[in-house]
Image (cartoon, rainbow, N blue to C red):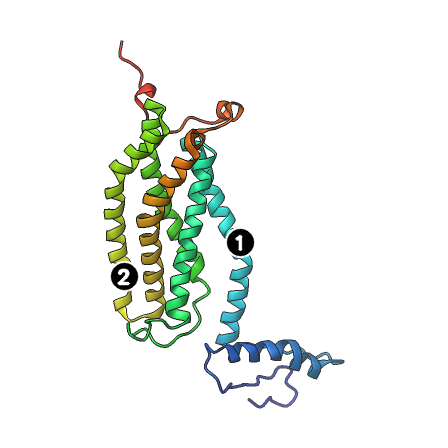
């Protein structure tokens, strides 16, 4: 818009020929900020800022992307510490962290394929292909790690209970998987049904969460927790429950469910 005489601030509106979600629009903003504007203002005291919704979302995505590794490191570390104290093991938390990251990566792959590449998004009435919202990974990771830890604790706590009583790693894994597997898959089926229902609301952002979380829970519960985790634990053997004695002496004694050995006998 025209600036008033003597005004120190002016606003120039630029309307690109491409859609806000197109890569060309983001490239235009980058070109304005890094090439065109610096060349035009070189040698002057003029300050030019590029704003608008597309620029704001791009800047927000940059900030989120920069902080995402720290966010992942924090939630993985906290989850590992809790499992470390609860099960007094080094490998159980490490296995859980790897499986959580695998589930998250697979879920993000499904979201990118459906919404960024456009696979089935048109058939489901979710519009054309476009970029995934920048805040989606942060919220999805937080929810997914919470759900994954529930399944992990439920599965491994039964294994740990059997290990404490029998000292047989193979038996502990089989008993734990047999007694909790159906419950885990049933709970996962309920969660998947709830998340899939998000798609039918017609809102793209809500549908992204629904598809992403449904895929993550299905992969985590049906494949990772009930197949890969027991398989890895069979390979590791008794090392699953190993903890240096010097560390064990300094850890607080916490248990998901106290064993019978921890219950004092009545006089």
Q: Secondary structure at mark 2?
A: helix
Above/below status of 54 relative to 263 = below
- Where does label 2 land, which residue? 196
Q: Secondary structure at mark 1?
A: helix
Residue 41's spot in the image, x, y percent?
70, 81
Which residue lies at the image location 48% right of the left edge and 25% below the top edge?
A: 248
Q: Using a 10 Å C-alpha cutoff, classify the residue at mark 2 as few (fewer than 14 neighbours), some (14 to 19) or many (20 or more).
A: some
Q: CA distance from mark 2 to mark 1?
A: 28 Å
Residue 205's spot in the image, x, y percent?
36, 67
Residue at the limit of the structure toward the right, as seen here: 43
Residue 257's spot in the image, x, y percent?
32, 30
Work out which quarter of the rendered image holds the C terminus and state it: top left
Mark toward the start of the polypeptide (2 vs 1): 1
Which mark, by number, is residue 50? none
- Where does label 1 land, which residue? 69
Q: Are marks 2 and 1 in contact (CB under 8 Å)?
A: no
Q: Using a 10 Å C-alpha cutoff, classify the residue at mark 1 as few (fewer than 14 neighbours), some (14 to 19) or many (20 or more).
A: few
């Amino acid at each position: 818009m025209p600036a008033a005489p003597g005004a120190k601030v002016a606003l120039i509106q630029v309307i690109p020929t491409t859609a806000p979600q197109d890569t060309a629009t983001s490239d235009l903003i980058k070109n304005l900020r890094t090439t065109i504007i610096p060349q035009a203002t070189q040698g002057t005291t003029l300050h030019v800022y590029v704003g608008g919704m597309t620029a704001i979302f791009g800047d927000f995505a940059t900030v989120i992307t920069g902080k995402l590794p720290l966010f992942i490191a924090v939630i993985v570390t906290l989850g590992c510490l809790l499992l470390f104290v609860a099960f007094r093991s080094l490998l159980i938390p490490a296995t859980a962290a790897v499986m959580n990251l695998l589930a998250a990566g697979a879920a993000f792959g499904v979201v990118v394929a459906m919404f960024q590449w456009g696979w089935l998004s048109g058939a489901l009435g979710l519009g054309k292909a476009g970029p995934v919202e920048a805040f989606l990974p942060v919220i999805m990771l937080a929810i997914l790690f919470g759900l994954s830890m529930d399944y992990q604790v439920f599965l491994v706590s039964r294994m740990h209970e059997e290990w404490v009583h029998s000292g047989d790693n193979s038996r502990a894994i089989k008993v734990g998987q047999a007694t909790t597997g159906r419950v885990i898959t049933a709970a996962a089926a309920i969660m998947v049904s709830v998340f899939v229902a998000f798609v039918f609301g017609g809102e793209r952002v809500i549908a992204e969460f629904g598809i992403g979380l449904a895929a993550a829970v299905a992969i985590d519960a049906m494949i990772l927790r009930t197949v890969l985790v027991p398989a890895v634990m069979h390979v590791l053997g008794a090392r699953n429950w190993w903890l240096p004695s010097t560390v064990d002496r300094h850890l607080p004694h916490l248990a998901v469910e106290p064993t019978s050995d921890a219950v004092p006998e009545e006089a």
